[in-house]
Image (cartoon, rainbow, N blue to C red):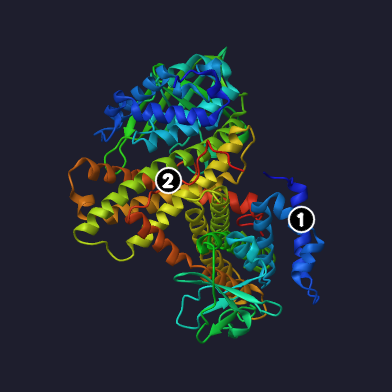
Amino acid sequence: MTVLDIDARAAVAQSLRDVFADDSPCDLPARLDRLGWSEVVQADPAMATTMLFNEQGGALASTRLLDDVVTNAIDPALTGHAVLYPSYSSVGSGLVLGPLSGVEHVLVPARDGLRAIPASTLSLRPFGGFDPASAWQIAVGDLPEGDKVEGDWRTGQAAGRRAIAAELLGVCRAALDLAIQHTTARRQYGRPLGSFQAVRHQLAEAYAEVEAAAAALAAAWSVADDPTLAQWGARTAKARAGQAQAVVLRRTVQVLGAMGLTEESPMHRFVERGAALDHLLGNHGALFEQIGRDLLTGSAAHPVVQIWEDRP
Amino acid sequence: MDGFAAELGSDLRAYAAGVRSFLRTNPALDQWRAVHHETTAERIHHEARLLGLLYDAGWNRWGWPETVGGLGGELVHRATLYDELAAAGLPIPQSTLMLETLGPAMVRFAPHLAERHLPAYLRGEEWWGQGFSEPEAGSDLAGLRTRARRDGEDWVVSGQKLWTSHGETAHRFVCLVRTGAPESRHKGLSMVLVDRESAGVTARPVAIAGGRNELAEVFFDDVRIPGDHLIGEPDGGWAVAMYLLQFERSVYGWQCAAVALARVRDLVVAAADLAATSGIPDGLTRRLGEVYSDVVTLRARSTETVRRLSAGQSVGPEASVDKVLLASVETGLYDLGRELLGGGFLAGTDRDERAWRDEWWYSRSATILGGSSEIQRTILADHVLGLPKEGGA
């Protein structure tokens, strides 16, 4: 069910860009509320979520919007909880995506099911490192036992992966735009860099990767309500978006020449955010490995998309 | 279910269910399962008989207008049929590759020829080759030199085509020829239909590595064709070619994705055998995951494109994305197969191993035919990304 036509979508995208560009202290949920965002989400969750996270990626904004996506998918009653994401490393016991001011409970996916722990019991330090601009924080030390919460983490994980895939695509598209601008404006040997075939083809490949990942994401949304395929589709979409991130940013950094390595150009920020988002809820290499292992242990090589099945 | 039921034209889901049930329950289809043909000619003839069987039951007539032997419906019907064939362990008949490339253009630009010849094509009694490339015109198609000159009501064609798909066995050739001045580039081209039986036509197979005769060189020595064998307007061949390329880049991608998914399933079986004996080499599990994800991604992309074409929308330069994706699916899949089969790929003599060898070579054409990967990237750079023109100041 697509309720917005192309013009309306462009207008919504512009409003979202304004929201993310606004550096005023007013918090993001309030700004989205003023936009009437919850109605847009209700009308078309696939389009709304994809647009919101596309724009967040393009703006390099670091927020806890993902928490709402994850908690809402598990159980709308959990809205307002923050989420402790797996850190997939020996460092810390998990990640939160921003400061927890005003948050009472943090949802923790544990081996034996979901738990909620008081936010005040978490000992946090900035995640920093490769992506110093992110607001992410890492939880250090042991976690309290917390209270058991009913719900399936995998549902939240699938919803989270679809949203992160969209955010990665936003990062990729913005980096590609920057690379196109640079190679159109900068001249060497008396002509624009973008007129050299070696440069043009690298950017064309990058574009094809982005569009491929966007198609994989649309496919994941088309099976989002299918209990057997939702997680399978979301994992593929996240893996493809992570792969697109690797391919696109390798190329966009290259065509910027030395400029791509500087603090002065924003390109490095796309690289850093891309790497962080690829890591969140499973990097593409690990996800491809899991997919391969599942196929080898009896999961069907499902077509996911059926051309005769025009799902909303 | 009856393959002629009128509601199948408007109920795609019912069509899919019907064709699936037909393909999985009809014992007559077993002769097309798990076959590896020694020659291209044998394969195309045998698989054409599968089209005949589908025609008699109605199934491959959906998606084509009634005027050309069809039963109505849309391109998505044809796409569903190809997908279900592959999923049922059956081949997508070789002759349909060119049917999908050339058929829609024929229906649109030369309905009289489509009415005359497409019914036999759908019955599997004839198929066509695509005569575009020439010795001096490969990627630079607009530089082609085969000429057609007017002679009274007729046209007289002379020149040479090369890399003509299915040229060894095709009953007719759809050729792009020069009707304007030698330097007229794409403005002076026309599309014509040439019967293989016409005096002056000689086709010689070109064996591709691996020994298969997928391609041919076709010589036209003052071949006289009737005036009504023109497809589209005189000097309007480029428009026909561009229309046709939308289908070549999109539907071919869909067919490739359908076959590739079946091939992924074969690879899973091969890998499981390996796991039970010598173990799976490092890295191949991840690559299997990547290849499968690539196939699903191509399906997703191709579904969007085919649905747009099916709804009568034109697909512009962005169809090059489909072509780039299908090329990476093909090369990635068959490279993985080659690596997994190891010595069996190199020297094995059973049916499957010979099939993987043949198909590996054919998979290398994915980055060449229908516009090479370089051409596709240039199209994307020019028309989608809007980068400065190549070599421009």
Three-letter amino acid code at the position of disc 1 = Val
Q: How far apart, in angstroms, are the residues tagged by discs 1 and 2?
A: 40 Å
Q: Residue furthest top?
A: B153
Q: Chain of mark 1?
A: A
The image shows residue A284 at horizontal and vertical percentages of 47, 65
Relative vertical location of residue A261 with respect to residue B219 in this rendering, above or below: below
- The residue lying toward the viewer, choosing from A184 and A169, is A169
The image shows residue B232 at horizontal and vertical percentages of 60, 24
Q: Which residue is under mark 2?
A: B366
Q: Secondary structure at mark 2?
A: helix
Q: Chain of mark 2?
A: B
Q: Residues within 10 Å of mark 1 (few under 14, many from 20)?
A: some
Judged left or right of residue A64, residue B210 is: left
Three-letter amino acid code at the position of disc 2 = Ala
Visible in this render: residue B185? no
Task: Report the disc number at residue A12.
Answer: 1
- The residue lying toward the viewer, choosing from B349 and B273, is B273
Which of labels 1 and 2 is toward the front? Answer: 1
- The residue lying toward the viewer, choosing from A125 and B30, is A125
Quarter of the image with the C terminus of chain A is: top right
At 37% across and 20% down in the image, what residue appears? B53
The reply to whether label 1 and label 2 mark residues of one chain is no
The image shows residue A114 at horizontal and vertical percentages of 52, 69
Quarter of the image with the N terminus of chain A is: top right
Judged left or right of residue B275, residue B254 is: right
The image shows residue A228 at horizontal and vertical percentages of 47, 50
Relative vertical location of residue A294 with respect to residue A121 in this rendering, above or below: above
Question: Residue B219 falls in which quadrant of the image?
Answer: top left
